[in-house]
């Protein structure tokens, strides 16, 4: 595989090449340029609302996605909603397809692979060719029984202990912190 050429940024005339995208105020996230003069991004469904901290967000609200995946065509100056209920998305290295993480109607995460920048099939066309609506026509994929994770419990414990120990050492407050021997504390618990 050939090494990629280094990225070179031409700063001369940069101001004239910048383009603003007319997005309403709100939560905009995951901006990805792809293809020729096209951009995709997720935008909160509460468009037009002030941007800032949502102090009254509850844990129940974080379980569902309130983001739409939007495509903006810089040439035509048009915005198109590609998918609703998007938790996240990633685009392939060759920019030809993308994987969408969607919140299904039952609240479960659904995975779809579609052409990059294309809308999801209509609800009527979503049945798919395979079992449970999976298949090429719907873009639905199942990762059940395909992903196996091997965990070395000792290595995992050592990592967790190291992270918690470091946090406690750096952030813990006691009336007399000079009395704590952080090295011996870590040594004591690393033997568990």
Image (cartoon, rainbow, N blue to C red):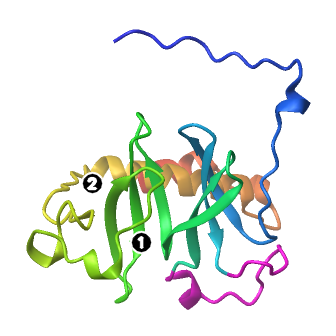
Q: Is residue 172 above or below residue 165?
A: below
- Residue 60, x across and y down, in percent: 54, 90
Q: Quadrant of the N terminus?
A: top left
- Identify the image quadrant of residue 111: bottom left
CA–CA distance between discs 2 and 1? 32 Å
Name of the residue lying farthest toward the front: 76
Between 161 and 95, which is closer to the camera in this rendering?
Answer: 95
Specify few, some or many for label 1: CA neighbours under 10 Å numbering under 14, 14-19, or 20 or more. Answer: many
- Identify the image quadrant of residue 128: bottom left
- Would you name the residue on which mark 1 appears? 102
Between 115 and 65, which is closer to the camera in this rendering?
Answer: 115
User: Left or right of 152: which side holds 87?
Assistant: right
Element carrying mark 1: strand
Residue 112 drawn in magenta: no
User: Left or right of 190: which side holds 46?
Assistant: right
The answer to whether residue 110 shows anywhere in this view is yes
- Residue 184, x across and y down, in percent: 55, 48
Specify few, some or many for label 2: CA neighbours under 10 Å numbering under 14, 14-19, or 20 or more. Answer: few
- Residue 56, x across and y down, in percent: 74, 90
User: Which segment is the magenta one?
Assistant: 46-64
- Would you name the residue on which mark 2 appears? 153
**Dominant secondary structure (helix, strand or loop) of the stretch shown in magenta:** loop
Q: Is residue 42 above or below residue 169?
A: below
Q: Residue at horizontal 82%, vertical 70%?
A: 25
Q: Is residue 13 above or below residue 71?
A: above
- Identify the image quadrant of residue 180: bottom right
Element carrying mark 2: helix
């Amino acid at each position: 595989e050939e090494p990629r050429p280094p990225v070179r940024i031409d700063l001369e005339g940069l101001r004239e090449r910048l383009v603003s995208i007319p997005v309403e105020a709100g939560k905009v996230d995951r901006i990805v340029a792809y293809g020729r003069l096209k951009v995709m991004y997720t935008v909160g469904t509460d468009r037009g609302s002030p941007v800032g901290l949502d102090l009254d967000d509850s844990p129940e609200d974080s379980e569902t996605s309130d983001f739409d995946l939007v495509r903006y065509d810089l040439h035509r100056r048009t915005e198109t909603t590609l998918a609703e209920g998007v938790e996240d998305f990633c685009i392939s290295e060759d920019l030809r397809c993308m994987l969408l993480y969607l919140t299904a109607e039952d609240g479960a995460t659904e995975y779809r692979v579609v052409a990059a920048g294309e809308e999801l099939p209509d609800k009527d066309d979503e049945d798919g060719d395979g079992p449970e609506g999976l298949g090429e026509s719907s873009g639905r994929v199942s990762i059940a029984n395909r992903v196996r994770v091997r965990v070395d419990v000792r290595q995992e414990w050592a990592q967790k202990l190291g992270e918690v120990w470091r946090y406690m050492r750096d952030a813990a407050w006691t009336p007399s912190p000079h009395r704590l021997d952080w090295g011996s504390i870590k040594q004591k618990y690393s033997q568990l």
